[in-house]
Image (tube, helix red, strand yellow):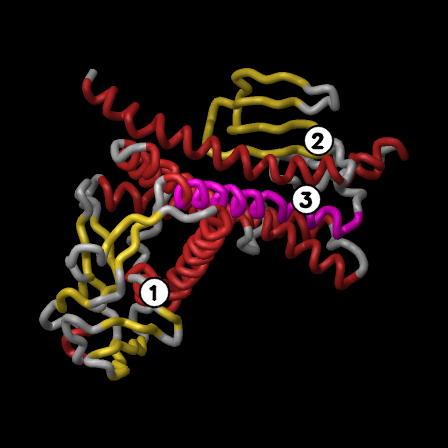
Amino acid sequence: MESLFSLAGYIVPFLIVLTIVVFFHELGHFLVARWNKVKVEAFSVGFGPELFGFNDRHGTRWKLCAVPLGGYVKFLGDANAASAPDFEGAEAMTEEEREGSFVHKRVGQRAAVVVAGPVANFILAIVIFSLIFMTFGRFVADPVVGSVDPGMPAAEAGIMPGDVILSANGTKVENFVDLQRVVAPSAGREVDIVVRRDGKELTFTLQPRMKERVDRFGNKQELSVIGIQSSADAGSSRVERAGPVEAVGYAVSETWFIVSSTISYLGDIVTGRQSTDQLGGPIRIAKVSGEVATLGPVALLNLAAVLSVSIGLLNLFPIPLLDGGHLVFYAIEAIRGRPLGEAAQEIGYRIGLALVLLLMFFATFNDITQIFLS
């Protein structure tokens, strides 16, 4: 019984967070589709058998399905939940049906509907981050070096306690978070750090090093570090609440950092600078959700924002079946003046399905290896 309660403690927060993120993603598609007068046949959170639902006055079936690992919006003219065109059905449509058919809309309208899902995810993340910064504040640590770890890149370069960090790779550093955002994606690359010492500005070139850290839950993570800590002097570290405009600015910056660091990490995997250990799937997300839920609602909200950005970015990858794949097809259509043929699109969707299934299998295998076998 205790194990069941423990399992529920992981699954319930995960499903809550995922459902919110998926709902807003699909809502983005839905609202822009309605704006472009596309008939929406179904709005589903989850896949598989319908648990319950209702029809609105426009004829859209809103439903919650048995497998809560995603969702979809199905338009008139779609062959399936992945919005693959129904070519035969499109040819047989009446003029009235064509007016509400997704496949008969202009390429720009279809692109707007598709990109609206990821955009909604980014907007949701910015809203959540803004609310956190306004209501609970953000942690700020003045960029004063408190200690330097022996044998680490900062010590080897000559950085000393008491140095005030001014910039990193040309980016102004106002607090330690700014420094971390430069160092984090810089594994295997040199970083130029400018400090002020005794009224003089000094420049140090160093190369961050990967180091394993273990969090309070026992999770291991490889981080890019230089080996310095902030000062522990009173007032150097604090929590500051932001005003509305300032909070939105911080939220946009936080969202962009997640996007840029994710892209950088994936690029480092390709070049061999990073391992694939940090790639996770549903099992790891569920585990992290349960752990974060024990830290309180703020931590869970932060996780929801991070997950929203990640899902928005993932859907923009140029893989057929994902939103980014559709956008590639539409770009080709815009250049050629006509859409790709049915056979070419079908091959594309099959390749996309294979890639998505391969990614899911790899991520799940990675989860099992990292969580249960390590």
Of the two numbered discs 3 and 2 on the same chain, state the one appearing first in sequence: 2
Query: For the point 69% across and 59% down, which residue is it?
Result: 331
**Residue indicated by mark 1:** 174
Q: CB of mark 1 within 8 Å of CB of mark 2?
A: no
Of the two numbered discs 1 and 2 on the same chain, state the one appearing first in sequence: 2
The span picked out in magenta is 106-133
Of the two numbered discs 1 and 3 on the same chain, state the one appearing first in sequence: 3
**Residue indicated by mark 3:** 113
User: Residue 269 at what x, y percent from top left?
Assistant: 36, 63
Q: Amino acid at mark 2?
A: Val
Question: Which quadrant of the view contains residue 275?
Answer: bottom left
Q: Amino acid at mark 3?
A: Val
Query: For the point 24% across and 81% down, which residue is it?
Result: 199
Q: Residue furthest left?
A: 150
User: Residue 98 at what x, y percent from top left?
Assistant: 84, 36
**Residue indicated by mark 2:** 40
State the separation of the CA atoms marked 1 and 3: 39 Å
Quadrant (top left, top right, bottom left, bottom right) of the N terminus: top left
Q: Residues within 10 Å of mark 2 (few under 14, many from 20)?
A: many
User: Residue 225 at what x, y percent from top left?
Assistant: 23, 65
